Image (cartoon, rainbow, N blue to C red):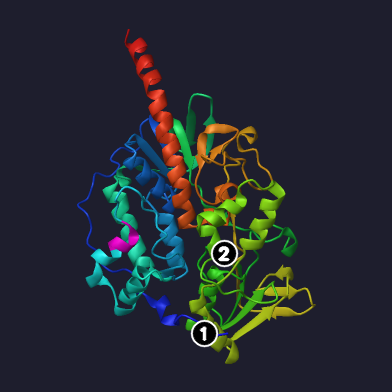
Amino acid sequence: MITFVPEPRLLESPRGREWPVLPATRSAVTPEPPSGADVVIVGAGPAGLAVASALWHHGVRDLVLVDRDGRPCGRFFDRVDLLGQRVLRSPYEHHPGVEGYRDCELLDFARLHWSVLTPVERREIRMAQAGHRSVVPVDVFEAYCRHLAASHHVTERTWRGSVREVLPTSEAVTVRADRFSVTARHVVLCLGEERRSAPDTWWGGGYPPRGVSYWDEPVPTAGNRLAVVGAGLTAAHLISNGLAQGREVHWVVREAGERYQCADVNSSFFRPEGRARFDGVSWSERLELMGRFRRASIMFEFRPTLEKAEAEGRLVVHRGKAITKVTPGGGLHLEDGSRVSVDHAVLALGTTPSIGDGLMPDNAVLDQGGWPQLDERTFAYVGAPRVFAVGAAAGMALGPAARNIDGHRVATARVAAAVAENLRRDAPLRTAAKDVARV
């Protein structure tokens, strides 16, 4: 059997290029959003951007986006740049644009800016046009997101705020942030995922000891020996960064071996027949599918670099060895009794979906094993029908692809259609209420 391994140079797309932009639209000039709106979107990452763009095409323009960073996709790209990531795992056909409305899609956008692309990037465009897997540069994706935000007037509807509560009633939903509150007919939660914390048994819980940090924090450059704990794409970037700095890198992988594949979930789940595997099966069966297919893996492009570094002794891989204890100064104690001593250890233990617990009442989330109970047709919360979920939180309704950009698009199409229909249905009631108020 012949195994095709893509070239590592695909990972080296430039970052920070100048891209043609649409004329600037009005930014959010008021310090606080209006007190009422048709829809509030919590989170302006790729999922929130997709929802806002889709609602624009449905004619729903009375929107408020509340985001802790205040910039569409700002936190997403800050995390990407912290890792030094240059390309996305998602191919060109996975994008936060809106299908079915003759909108400008990611591949269209890249082709429109052909002169900005490198020869390697242009070859990837041709691969995408031919129906093959292709790698999307972060630079292209960010420019495209800025284009979407401008062309669908998302930036001017985005306010910075940390949401404290989401309080649903039968008639409306109130979103309370640190500086303001907005009451809306509907709310869409695009909360994304947060880093997974280490087990309390490693050091007693709380913030990591000296010489240990998580992947979403800057990695100290002092010291020659670095350890990376984790088996996913984030770990691969951290390892590559350490090797590029000339450091001796130790890689701790709990599984018997690392996994290389194109996507972080099986590609079948990006297709309707794959998503249908979740339809009509029990909750326990879905949990089993999520556990089996939502596993850490690394893009194929990293494989030659990491294997070469291991052969040369610059990378030491500790396979099949779980950590039992972490001590100050970067000491990692493994289950076989051995110890890895480094100057600094970085934990890349994956992420957990943000499902709305802590924001909404328990009877709204109906948490079942870390997953909310959603209407599988509309992705509305069963316990709060005016609140919807797009992103990883919809995993048990949509399948493993829910956490990916392609899954965002599928969920967005259903949520936007449901919200627009509900608003049309409620319109006569709202008009009658306003007439009564005037009398």
In the image, taking residue 210 as reference, residue 106 lies left or right, namely left
Residue that protrudes farthest toward the front in the picture: 273
Quadrant location, the C terminus: top left
Which residue is label 2 attached to?
266
Q: Position of residue 438 (x, y in %)?
A: 32, 11
In the image, 219 versus 61, the foreground residue is 61
Residue type (three-letter) at the residue carrying disc 2: Asn
Q: Earlier in the sequence, mark 1 or mark 2?
A: 2
All told, the count of numbered labels is 2
Return the residue found at the far bottom.
Answer: 312
- State the image quarter where residue 252 is shown: bottom right
Q: CA distance from mark 1 to mark 2?
A: 22 Å
Q: Which residue is nearer to you in this view: 289 or 114?
A: 289
Q: Position of residue 83 (x, y in %)?
A: 47, 69
Residue drawn at (54%, 62%) of the image = 268
Q: Is residue 162 left or right of residue 210?
A: left
Pointer 1 and pointer 2: residues touching (CB < 8 Å)? no
Identity of the residue drawn at 42% across and 53% down? 46
- What are the residue bounds of the magenta stretch? 105-109
- Circle 1 sits on which residue? 304
